[in-house]
Image (spheres, rainbow, N blue to C red):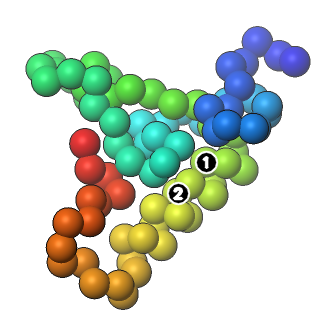
Amino acid sequence: MSGEPCCDVIGCDDNGEVVSRLSPEGYLVATGKKAYSFREAYRQFRYCKKCHDYLMSSVWNRINSSEDKSGDHVAPTAI
């Protein structure tokens, strides 16, 4: 295995070549209340290309879904 960290998706042992601020569940994750830059504001995750593509597709499908968007559902990008 190369020096790259593993993908953050449970059960995937591929190299985490893609850095993202989307959690494996498809939500943006904040790490603190005070942030002075985008880099400091959000936790970073690593994904292999296959898992990242799947995650992005899943988020996009939820955003574009014709399901009822009223109510208490949290947006896929909630922080």
Can the viewer see residue 17 in this picture? Answer: no
Expressed as whole percent of the image width and height from the top left, the position of residue 47 reads: 63, 37
Residue 42 lies, with reference to residue 40, above or below; the image says below
Report the disc number at residue 2. Answer: none
Measured from the top left, where is residue 4 in percent x and y? 72, 18
- Residue lying farthest right? 1
**Three-letter amino acid code at the position of disc 1:** His
Q: Is residue 49 above or below residue 4?
A: below
Q: Residue at x 34, y 36 (%)?
A: 29
Residue designated by label 2: 56
Is 1 located above or below residue 52 in the figure? above
Alpha carbons under labels 2 and 1: distance apart: 6 Å
In the displayed structure image, the side of residue 60 where residue 33 appears, left or right? left
From the viewer's perspective, is 47 left or right of 25? Answer: right
With 64 as the anchor, is 37 left or right in this view?
Answer: left
Is label 1 in a helix, a strand or a loop? helix
Please give the label number shown on residue 52.
1
Secondary structure beneath label 2: helix
Q: Residue at x 44, y 43 (%)?
A: 22
Residue ID at (39%, 78%):
64
Q: Are marks 2 and 1 in contact (CB under 8 Å)?
A: yes
Front in this rendered view, residue 2 or 34: 34
Q: Residue at x 63, y 58 (%)?
A: 54
Q: Looking at the figure, which quarter contains the C terminus?
A: top left
